Amino acid sequence: MSVNEAPANVRLIGGEMLLWSDMSGIGGVTEWRGAALELIRRLVPPDGRVLLVGPHPEQVVDDVVARAGSAAALVRSFPDARALGERHPDLEVFCGRLEALDVAEPYDLVLALDGLLRTHSAEAPASAWSESLAALAGLTRPGGRLVLVVRNDLGIDRFIEARPADRECGDDQWAPHGFDPSYPGGPAALDHGLESAGLSPQRCYAAYPDREAPRSLLSREALAGELPEALTFPLSARESDRMLVADPLSLTRLVFRHGLGEELAPLWLAVATRPPLTADQAHPAPSGPVSADSGDRVQPAPAESGHPAHPVELPLGLIEEGRSLYELTGHGTRRLPDGEERPVPAGRVVEEILVEACAREDVKTVRELLSSLAEWLERSGEVSAATDSLVYDGERFAAVNPSAAPVTPREPRVVLCRILWRFAVRLLAAGHHHPWPWPLQADQLALTLCGMAERPCDHGDLDLARKLDAELGQPAELGEHAPTYRDLLGARDRLADQLTAALARISRLETKLSYRERELVRAKAKLRRTQRKATAYRRTLGYRLSRRLARPRKVARRVMRLLSG
């Protein structure tokens, strides 16, 4: 097959971009994973028709094609369309812009997990967001569902990133974003836009922690209440930044505490339905001929247009933690696929308590908390716990998400050493203040904390702790990655603190050295005066006579010793 030849299942509809690819990594397609995949699996009708609009990760496309009765995809990039057509021969692929798509029969489920910004083409002016939504609603059959993702222009990730998210001078940004008055500026505006397009919002989710790789979907009903810290802490930073416990975590924690989780979410995922046709709408009275060039879409058959969507129980929330996926229920969480419901433990996250105590230099609180933690580990036999996965209510500890896979038992001392070593790595990497010397390394700080917990450890225990951490698959140390602006600022601040401490020590040593030099000069002057006095005394007549008179006596004493001995 030549470069410009398309597979048989790829159809060009107009506005296609022949030399452009949205999957090249330039535009940053959202990496939807466990939480979104679980929601899509519940929504895909086994015998229905599904349309994917815009670029989607390969895992999402593969899952939809495997589960749906028939599937189709719409992309604007010709290379992406060719790749989809070759990967899935049974997938009908349309290549072009959204407004040019005209199908004879609408779809039971329309998925637009990349939003509407990448449904336009550089070959024509971009349509307004409301117009694109109306075109998308026209592709949804009455009784069908639409899943639409909208990027929040005031999401929490906008306050975290140093560079503007949409104006990085990339090749894909030929149309500036933010000048469309119809683009929703909040959850209420999103609901209004869906209703104006003839859709009924069914449930709206807030995606966290960022738009690049969301790990959780929290519904509006779940965010309306006060979420426990055991839920919000793991969602407060990106996966790479979570090891740092840096500024993104603190900022997002404040968002949840102030009840702004939905308004400041990086992404909104809305599930809406198109109301089924009534009997009068399904059998309209003839009102005269319809012009062939009127631009109206072909209406579906009345027998099919009134079928409601297959019943789906939408979850209150889906949370991905490591390799596990949890569903948020009315009374707690449930591990998927067949875990039992368990209540969310109450209390504060142990890591926040320790960071706060270190910031106040409250060594007593640190010692008491670590001693209680060591006693709890000895009683419970917990192996996979960490300071960011434990909560403490003042009396007892509880794991946020207990480990599903059994782990080989370890000595409680080694388990505690691993926990404190992970905390030391994260504390130093984040640049938080603590009451111990700044040049202290993570290993030394971990051993110091073990001593404060009255469980002394050595370097052999520390090596076993690292092996346990590697076995659990939760590395505390970050891999090599390009430092962000905030990382550089944090490193600069840490170096500035160390330089300030070193300069203060040098100043104290210079002051002490100057004082010692002055004392030395005074001592030398006093010694010179004493030497001059002694020299002058040796020149006197009395000193010379006494020296000469003392010599015969010395000789006489020596002779007497020889004679007597």
Image (spheres, rainbow, N blue to C red):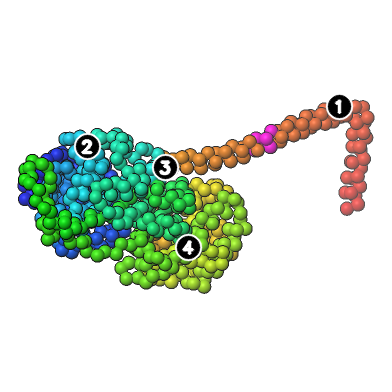
Q: Is the magenta stretch mostly helix, strand or loop?
A: helix
Looking at the image, tell me whether mark 1 or mark 2 is earlier in sequence order: 2
Q: Position of residue 530 (x, y in %)?
A: 82, 31
In this rendering, position of residue 88 left or right of residue 337: left
| Location of mark 4 (residue) | 390
| Location of mark 3 (residue) | 159
Badge 4 density bin: few <14, some 14–19, many ≥20, Cα 10 Å: many
Q: Is residue 268 above or below residue 512?
A: below
Q: What element carries label 1?
A: helix
Callouts 2 and 3 close, C-beta under 8 Å: no
Asked if one can make out residue 105 in the rendered structure from this viewpoint, the answer is no
| Location of mark 2 (residue) | 126
- Which region is colored magenta? 509-514
Q: Name the one closer to the observer, 170 or 476.
A: 170
Q: Position of residue 222 (x, y in %)?
A: 40, 59
Q: Name the one closer to the observer, 184 or 234.
A: 184
Q: Is mark 4 on a helix, strand or loop?
A: strand
Looking at the image, tell me whether mark 1 or mark 4 is earlier in sequence order: 4
Per the model, the C-alpha gap separating discs 4 and 2 is: 49 Å
| Identity of the residue drawn at 90% across and 30% down | 544
Per the model, the C-alpha gap separating discs 2 and 3 is: 27 Å
| Location of mark 1 (residue) | 536
Looking at the image, tell me whether mark 4 or mark 3 is earlier in sequence order: 3
Callouts 4 and 3 close, C-beta under 8 Å: no
Per the model, the C-alpha gap separating discs 1 and 2 is: 107 Å
| Identity of the residue drawn at 26% across and 64% down | 312
Q: How many labels does the image show?
A: 4
Circle 3 or circle 1, nearest the eye: 3
Residue type at the position of mark 3: Phe
Q: Where is residue 512 in the image (x, y as percent from the top left)?
A: 68, 37
